[in-house]
Amino acid sequence: MLNTVQAPQVEIPLGVRLRLGRAAVQAVADEAGADILHIKGDAVAPELRPVVRPGTDVDILARPSHVARLDAALRARGWTVYSTFTYGSPFGHAQTYTHEQWGYLDLHRFFPGIEADPAVAFETLWSGRIRHHIAGIDGAAPAVAAQAVILLLNDARSRRSADADALWQEVGDVRRSEIGSLVALLHAEVAFAAATGDLESQRSASSYALWKVITTGGSRAAEWRARVRAAPNLWQAARIVARAPAVNVEHLAHRLGRRPTRREIVMAFFARPVTAVVQFVAGLRERR
Amino acid sequence: MTRLRRAAGVAWVTADSAAYVARIPSGPIVVLTGPAAVIWDELTIDGDAATLTERVSERMSDVPPDADATVKHVVERLQAEGLLDRLGP
């Protein structure tokens, strides 16, 4: 007669788990006094994506100065770091966590393609935020136009899809104008041009080569050269070069399904330059 | 008048005739199905305890004679789990 069952005795649909996970993350952020914006997945406004796609994880963008306190609060509340900012992606923009109840969380400290200072960019998005009601809990999401910018920039990173084209074509003139203004405010012109198929208009930009590689493909060596060229200053460039030859230990661990041994890390370290050289030679051949 | 309301720090999602309710941020997720899911749904609309059995019964096809006892039992369990607060006597 009493039909109550405690998970995990029954299967929880992924979409349900992620929505509850968003609410849980919001609760942690509130406890920690951290400003966050819910992005992507089921946080996207129906105007932009009529059919909800929950995705596979929870994505949030945090105020950069609040990232450390949010990170500490998440760890204290049972989230475990799955991949770090350093090794999670070549952009270094997000850290991934897992939680036994809520699944995966991507904590973004900035969004790739937005070249404005991360703190300034967050404030721009935060000042236009809208209420986002999640599983009975109040949170915030970027304004609809800002959500469109994020979706388009995100899509540019995954080498453009029909979704991005459809989104850009179907938004009305007023919304398109809002999006254009926001792109300028966020200094996201290059990635936005990549997303909308107009990258060649940005040939003189320092980040042009990077987005060219991202959208059309290229060797890892070409990608790293482009990243160095796109770095905002020499110190940033030096850090990128210093990181390039290092072994991504987390990636190696996920590939092996266990923590790699020191020997495996060393072998992977020596394997990388060989791969890079092969790709570089291949790149030379392509240009002939 | 006794009123029942969702406890602070409780999130919930309804999907496919079930209610998934959790204390956040740590969980666990409690899955309510059948009459329990209807009871939760009714409580999110109106917390009046006096009319709860009647409202739930209207939404169920087979209402047993001990429906009121079932509703009380579910409500007590939800309170014990920290998911529901009782206001008033």
Image (cartoon, coloured by chain):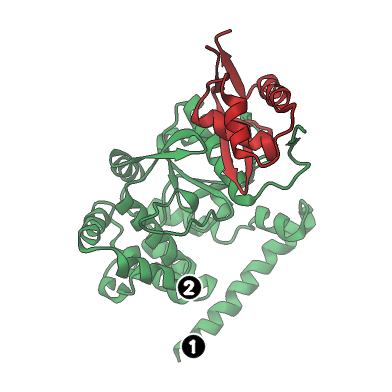
Chain colours: A green, B red
First in sequence: mark 1 or mark 2?
A: 2
- Please tell me in which quadrant of the rendered image residue A195 appears: bottom left
- Residue closer to the observer: B66 or A139: B66
Location of the N terminus of chain A by quadrant is top right
Q: Residues within 10 Å of mark 1 (few under 14, many from 20)?
A: few
Residue named by callout 2: A222
- Judge from the rendering whether residue A144 lies leftward or rightward of residue A139; answer left or right: left
Location of the C terminus of chain A by quadrant is bottom left
Q: Chain of mark 1?
A: A
Residue A240 picture location, percent across and down = 48, 57
- Residue closer to the observer: A229 or B23: B23
Picture residue at 66% right of the left edge, 57% below the top: A251
- Residue closer to the observer: A57 or B10: B10
As drawn, A216 above or below B11 = below
As drawn, A201 above or below A16 = below
Residue named by callout 1: A286
Is residue A128 visible in the rendered structure shown here?
Answer: yes
Q: Chain of mark 2?
A: A
Picture residue at 41% right of the left edge, 66% below the top: A156
Q: Residues within 10 Å of mark 2 (few under 14, many from 20)?
A: some
Residue A285 picture location, percent across and down = 51, 88
Q: Are marks 1 and 2 on the same chain?
A: yes
